[in-house]
Structure formats: structure tokens, C-alpha cells
Image (cartoon, rainbow, N blue to C red):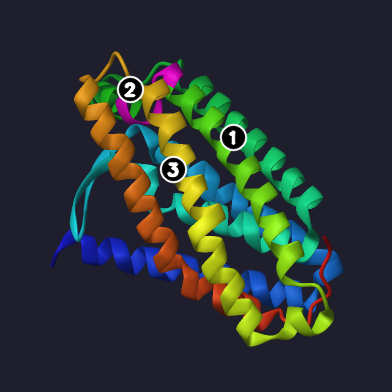
Amino acid sequence: MNPMIYAWIFWIVGNTMSTIFGAYLVKKYRNTYGLPTLIVLYSIYSVGANILASRITIYNIIIPFVVSGGTLIFPFVSQLDDMINEVYGRRRAYIAISVALISNILMATFILADAVLPVPAWEVDANKYWIQFMVAAPRVMLASYIAFAVDELWNATIFAKLKKQAYRTEEDWKSNRKIIALVLTRVTTSDASTMVIDSIVFYPIAFIGILPYNVVINMIWMGALMKLLLAIFNSPWYIIYRMLIKNVKREF
């Protein structure tokens, strides 16, 4: 079977679980478990995307894309930020970004702490591969964190403005037409700009001087295009989320 089929299966299952579980808790436990759950999911996805960032991968989506491994799940990172922003407002979205950033830094320190320890003789060869993948160059880690902070703060700010303009009354909040209109507007504005910003910030910082200049340029536009395509593919999950929580109180 084509490896991309397996990748899509994992992607669909992961996004569906996060969307349905998050919406259920937000709807049933808005003021208790809802926000912490979304922040945990957001942190898990962002840590996963940054761990995979150092792995260069080929994704066949219409055309072959040569991008970092985290590209496949990064658009859903921004979507989880929007899921928080949608109900709990921009300030709590900023808090979620801070928690996710700290989670990434902590994960990096744990990996580095383990990486400096010796291994048994029979694990030496395996350890080389582990180090090569898990212990990214410091500049790759730095690029991941800078790009994450810049693009997620941008995304949270733009989305909050879109939400405030779209939902002027409670009827707007519950209108299926308004929900779909905002999702489509979100994809073409905040999502599109966020995906482009992430690629423009991450790839030059991470790889210029390591990889040929033309390769880095190709990775920038390929990464931005692939993330935008995935953001479009993510839209049905966001519509499902919004339909499930349409009667939940919102904050701006």
C-alpha cells in the first residue's frame, strides 16, 4: 500500500479524535475541563510538530513536497489554537501559546538531558540514529520555537478580529451560514498568512548555510503551499467543531 495512504489514515484519525473529544468537553464542561483539554491537545500537537521538524520528508500530495516532517500536523496546531480562541477568547489563546511553547522547551531539555548519558555497548549504533533524529541542531530548535511563537501569535490575533466582526449577535454565533462563512474566511486569511509566515521564518533560520540556497527556497514555497492545502483539508473538522459547540457561551 502507498505510504501516503497510511499517513492520511493516521492524520484523519488523529484530527477526528481531537475535534470530537475537544468539542464534547467544551460543550459539556465549558468552565472546567474544556479549556485545559484543548490546551493539552494543542501542546501535544505542537510538541509533535517540532520533534518532527528536523526530519526532511517527501509527501506526495498532488505533487511531491520536500518539507520538514512536522508539516503534516502543523496546520492542525493552528486549528486547535482557533478552537480555543473561538470559545474562550484571544487572551486565553495567548495563554495556550505560552503553555505550548514552554512544553516544547521542556521537551527539548528532557531530550538533551537523556542524550548526554552513555549507552550500553550493544546500543551504540542504534544510539547514533536516535541522536541524529531526536537531537536537532540548536538552530533547528531555535527556528522551530521562533516560527511557532511568531505565527501562532499572528494567527490568534487575526482570528480574534475575524470572530469579532463575524459574530455581532447571538443569532450570528448559532447561524450555520455564519459558521461556514467564518471558516472559509479563516482559511483564506488567518490560515493562509500563518502558513506562509511559518515557512518564511522557519526554513531560512533552520537550514540556510546547511543546505544549498535553492533547496531552502524550494522548501519555503513547498512548505507554505502544503500547509495551506492541509489547512483547507482541515476545514471540515473545524466546521464539525463549530456545529457541535454552537450553543456554548463564547468570549472575545
Residue 138 part of the magenta segment: yes
Residue 46 at what x, y percent from top left? Answer: 54, 45
* Residue at horizontal 56 percent and vertical 53 percent from the top: 190
Q: Amino acid at mark 1?
A: Val
| Camera-nearest residue between 48 and 241 | 241
Residue 20 visible in rendering: no
Residue 23 at what x, y percent from top left? Answer: 66, 74
Q: Amino acid at mark 2?
A: Phe
Say which quadrant the N terminus sits in: bottom left
Q: Quadrant of residue 159?
A: bottom right
Per the image, label 1 sits on a secondary structure element best described as helix
Identify the residue position indicated by label 2 in the image.
207
Residue 145 visible in rendering: yes
**For discs 1 and 2, the disc positioned in front in the rendered view:** 1
* Residue 150's disc number: 1
Identify the residue position indicated by label 3 in the image.
196
Q: Are marks 1 and 2 in contact (CB under 8 Å)?
A: no
**For discs 3 and 1, the disc positioned in front in the rendered view:** 3
Q: Residues within 10 Å of mark 2 (few under 14, many from 20)?
A: some
| Camera-nearest residue between 126 and 26 | 26
Q: Earlier in the sequence, mark 3 or mark 1?
A: 1
* Residue at horizontal 65 percent and vertical 63 percent from the top: 83
Give above or below for 95 relative to 183: above
Residue 198 part of the magenta segment: no
What range is drawn magenta here? Answer: 132-139
* Residue at horizontal 32 percent and vertical 18 percent from the top: 208
* Residue 12's disc number: none
Residue 12 at what x, y percent from top left? Answer: 40, 69
